[in-house]
């Protein structure tokens, strides 16, 4: 497993911890790469997927900040 695949796995776990469901993560993966099997995608698609997953992590973080401010 290369470093990018390890990073993808880490990001997927972070999204799960942030409250995303597996089907939502699978949707991001499929939308970004055309497949849910990341082991078979090119290095450039792996990098695109990392960027997409990081975006969703950032989005979740921004949502959490706004929801805490309302409390």
Image (cartoon, rainbow, N blue to C red):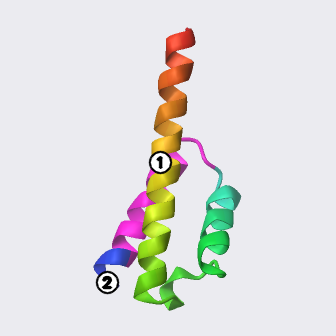
Q: Would you identify the image quadrant in which residue 50 lies? A: bottom left
Residue 26 visible somewhere in the drawing: yes
What is the x, y in percent for residue 43? Answer: 40, 86
Taking depth in this image into account, of 66 and 14 the one nearest to the observer is 66
* Residue placed under numbered mark 2 in the picture: 2
Q: Is residue 12 visible?
A: no
In percent of the image, x 65 and y 81: which residue is there?
35
Magenta span includes 14: yes
Q: In the visual, does 11 lie left or right of 71?
A: left
Q: Residue at the location (58% across, 42% down)?
A: 19
Residue matched to label 1: 57
Where the C terminus falls, by quadrant?
top right
Judged from the image, the secondary structure of the residue bearing numbered disc 1 is helix
User: Vertical placement of 32 versus 20: above or below?
Assistant: below
The residue tagged with tag 2: helix, strand or loop?
loop
Which residue: 60% across, 70% down?
29
Disc 2 and disc 1: Cα gap in Å? Answer: 22 Å
Q: Position of residue 26 (x, y in %)?
A: 65, 66
Residue at (66% x, 81% y) in the render: 34
Asked if residue 53 is positioned above or below residue 68 in the image, the reply reads below
Disc number placed over residue 67 in the picture, else none: none
Q: Residue pushed farthest left?
A: 3
For label 1, count other residues whose C-alpha is less than 10 Å away and answer few (under 14), some (14-19) or many (20+). Answer: some
Q: Is 26 rendered above or below residue 66? A: below
Q: Nearer the viewer, mark 2 or mark 1?
A: 1
x and y percent of residue 9 in the render?
43, 67
Determine if the magenta segment contains residue 38.
no
Query: Which segment did they paint magenta?
Result: 5-20
| First in residue order: circle 2 vs circle 1 | 2
Q: Characterize the magenta stretch by its predominant secondary structure.
A: helix
Quadrant (top left/top right/bottom left/bottom right) for the N terminus: bottom left
Name the one closer to the observer, 69 or 22: 69
């Amino acid at each position: 497993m290369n470093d990018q695949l390890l990073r993808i796995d880490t990001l997927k776990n972070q999204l799960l911890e942030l409250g995303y469901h597996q089907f939502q993560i699978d949707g991001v993966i499929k939308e970004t790469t055309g497949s849910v099997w990341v082991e078979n995608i090119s290095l450039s698609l792996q990098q695109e997927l990392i960027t997409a997953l990081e975006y969703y992590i950032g989005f979740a973080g921004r949502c959490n900040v706004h929801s805490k401010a309302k409390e």
